[in-house]
Image (spheres, rainbow, N blue to C red):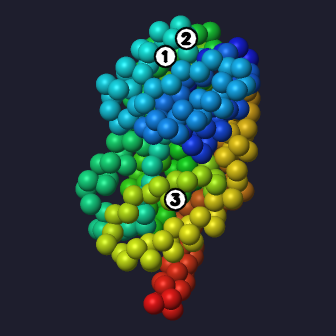
């Protein structure tokens, strides 16, 4: 799909991949609409977009609130008159916790933002996308929408849901949404603040929790700007699935080649790493 002179919408654009996408699309696009729950961070993204000479529309939105997302869609259409690309990027994470340790409230919180936010964003803009000769929906899943890992059942649940939604909608597109491409994005370790912003759901000591976050951040290596460039290339090339990072590509291959064994292999590595972090914490006491 050609993205020159189009109008794009990006949720969760206050930081990370969302901000990088907004800034990158500000070049070829005629207008970029962004939303985030953090007004200050969103305004900073807007300044970066405007600095590239692109129209920008902003609105503070909690994507877990359907009425708020629908109001955002109405406001964007009033401002731009059309929408060609919608990127549902807003997402959250929780700290390491088993299914037994994760309260219902935290499952509901993460599902509300990651899964329902994606559904609300897609459905709110879909009627407008259908009016365009060519349009794109990009829903950001994760490496953990391809493989599941221990102590992240809540997060994996939402990201697998996004992947399934994308694949189903892509199949529907031929009959129901002519001209619409649906892209499922699966980032691996991207250097964003998602780990630091993760909600703590267990009663683990803060020092141990901080060590776990630092340990996880070691795998977050790719700059969000590079990830954004790969997503935009996927839009241009109409790639139904975009894997970002060597880790995403390697583990996707592992899961496909060894569907019975990858759970045991990864489970062993994760347990070993958890024990290392625990030992380091005990030594520091």
Measured in 3D between alpha carbons, the distance from the residue under mark 2 to the one under mark 3, in whole angstroms, is: 34 Å
Q: Mark 1: which secondary structure?
A: helix
Left or right of residue 274, residue 249 in this image: right
Question: Residue 195, which numbered label?
Answer: 3
Residue found at x 55% / y 78%: 273
Residue found at x 52% / y 81%: 277
Q: Residues within 10 Å of mark 3 (few under 14, many from 20)?
A: some
Residue found at x 37% / y 77%: 205
* Residue 248 image point, x, y percent: 65, 55
* Camera-side residue of 126 and 192: 192
On the question of residue 34 being in view, the answer is yes
* Residue 206 image point, x, y percent: 40, 74
Left or right of residue 241, residue 229 in this image: right
Residues under numbered marks 1 and 3 in contact, where contact means CB atoms less than 8 Å apart = no
Question: Which residue in the protein does label 2 denote?
Answer: 80
Above-or-below relation of 210 to 163: below
Question: Which residue in the protein does label 1 denote?
Answer: 76
Q: Mark 3: which secondary structure?
A: loop
Q: Residues within 10 Å of mark 2 (few under 14, many from 20)?
A: some
* Residue 27 image point, x, y percent: 74, 24
């Amino acid at each position: 799909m050609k993205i020159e002179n189009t109008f794009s919408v990006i949720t969760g654009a206050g930081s990370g991949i969302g901000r990088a996408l907004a800034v990158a699309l500000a070049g070829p696009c005629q207008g970029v609409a962004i939303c985030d729950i953090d007004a200050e961070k969103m305004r900073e993204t807007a300044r970066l977009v405007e600095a590239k000479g692109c129209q920008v529309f902003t609105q503070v939105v909690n994507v877990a609130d359907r009425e708020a997302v629908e109001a955002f869609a109405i406001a964007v259409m009033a401002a731009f008159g059309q929408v060609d690309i919608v990127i549902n990027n807003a997402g959250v994470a929780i700290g390491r916790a088993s299914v037994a340790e994760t309260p219902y409230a935290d499952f509901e919180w993460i599902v509300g933002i990651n899964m329902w936010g994606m559904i609300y964003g897609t459905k709110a803009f879909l009627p407008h996308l259908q009016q365009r000769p060519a349009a794109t929906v990009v829903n950001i899943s994760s490496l953990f929408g391809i493989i599941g890992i221990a102590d992240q059942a809540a997060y994996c649940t939402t990201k697998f849901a996004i992947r399934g939604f994308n694949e189903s909608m892509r199949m529907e597109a031929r009959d129901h949404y002519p001209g619409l491409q649906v892209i499922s994005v699966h980032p691996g370790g991207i250097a964003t603040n998602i780990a630091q912003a993760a909600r703590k759901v267990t009663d683990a000591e803060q020092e141990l929790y901080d060590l776990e976050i630092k340990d996880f951040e070691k795998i977050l290596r790719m700059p969000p700007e590079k990830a954004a460039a790969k997503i935009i290339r996927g839009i241009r090339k109409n790639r139904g699935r975009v894997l970002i990072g060597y880790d995403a590509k390697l583990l996707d291959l592992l899961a496909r080649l060894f569907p019975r064994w990858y759970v045991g292999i990864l489970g062993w590595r994760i347990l070993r790493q958890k024990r290392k972090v625990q030992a380091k914490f005990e030594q520091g006491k």
